[in-house]
Image: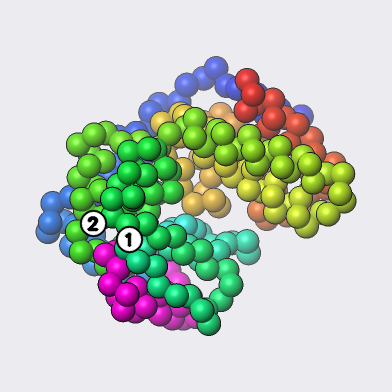
Amino acid sequence: MTTLTRSWRQPAPTRNGLAELPPPDPKLWESRISQDRARVAACQSKLVLSITREIESRSHDVGAHALVLTGSTARDRRTRVSDLDYQVIGEKPEISGLPSDIDLYGDEPDLFLAKMFKGDDFAHWALRYGCILFDDGALRKAAIAAIEHDLWPDPERKLRQAKRAVEFSQKLLPTGDYAALLEVSRGAFSLAARWWLISHDVFPLARDELAQQLVEVDQPALARALEETIHRRPTAATIASWLDQLSELTSA
C-alpha cells in the first residue's frame, strides 16, 4: 500500500504560472469582473444563481466594497459536500432566509489586505480564482499589493491547521460516530493537501481538483485519501490508517 511519506522529488514551481495573479490594470480589471460575472451565470443552476444574486443585492444594500463567489462553485466543481462560499469586503449582509450551507466571510479592506500579507490562503484564493461580482477598488488594491510584494500563502500556517484537524479526527475514532469522522477527516485531508501544494509552489484549486494536483506533485496516497472521503465512504479502519500516515507526514 502506498504510504503518505515525504517525496524527495521537487516538482517544477508554478508560482508564476498556474497561480498567476490577475492584471491590476483598470481596463483589464473591469474585463475580468465582466468575465467572472459571465462565469457565475454559466456555472450555477438557477437555484444557486438566485442565491448568489440575492447575496449580491444584500451586499450592495449594506454598502459592501466587493463581493466574490469562491470555492468549488466558482470553479464549476461542486460535489455533494460542497457549500456555497462567498467573500465580502466591507460589511457583511444578513443571510437569514437563505440555505444553511452558505459560508459568508467578511473583512474590511484593511483586514483583507493584512490577511494577504500574513499568507491567508483563503484570501489569496478569493483574489486569484474567485468570481468577482463587483469591486469598488478594494480588491484591485489587494491585487496590486500581491504583485508588488510577491505575496504567497504561508505553508506553515496551513500545516498548523492540518495538524490540529488530524488530531481532532483521531479523537473521534473511539466514539464510533462515523458521519462525524468522515466529515472531519475529509477536512483534515483537504487542509493537508493545501499545505503540501502551497509548500511545493503550487496554488491549490477547488477541493475536487486537489487530488489531481497532488498526483502531479508525487503525493498519490494523500490524493486517494481525499478522493475517497469526498466521493465514497471508506471504512473507519481505513480512515484511521490514513490519519496515522498523515500524522507522520505532517510531523516529519
Q: Is residue 128 left or right of residue 165?
A: left
Q: Residues within 10 Å of mark 1 (few under 14, many from 20)?
A: many
Q: Quadrant of residue 55?
A: bottom left
Q: Residue at x 55, y 52 (%)?
A: 208
* Position of 198 relative to 60 (above/below): above
Which quarter of the rendering shows the N terminus? top right
Q: Main secondary structure of the magenta part?
A: helix
Residue pointed to by mark 2: 138
Magenta region, residue range = 41-66
Left/right placement of residue 130 relative to residue 155 reads left
Measuring 51% from the left and 79% from the top, which residue is drawn there? 96
- From the top left corner, tell me how far across and down residue 244 is, in percent: 75, 31
Rendered image: mark on residue 89: 1
Q: Is residue 152 left or right of residue 228?
A: left
Nearer-the-camera pick, 200 or 116? 116
Q: Residue at x 69, y 30 (%)?
A: 247
Residue 95 in the image: state x and y as whole percent: 48, 75
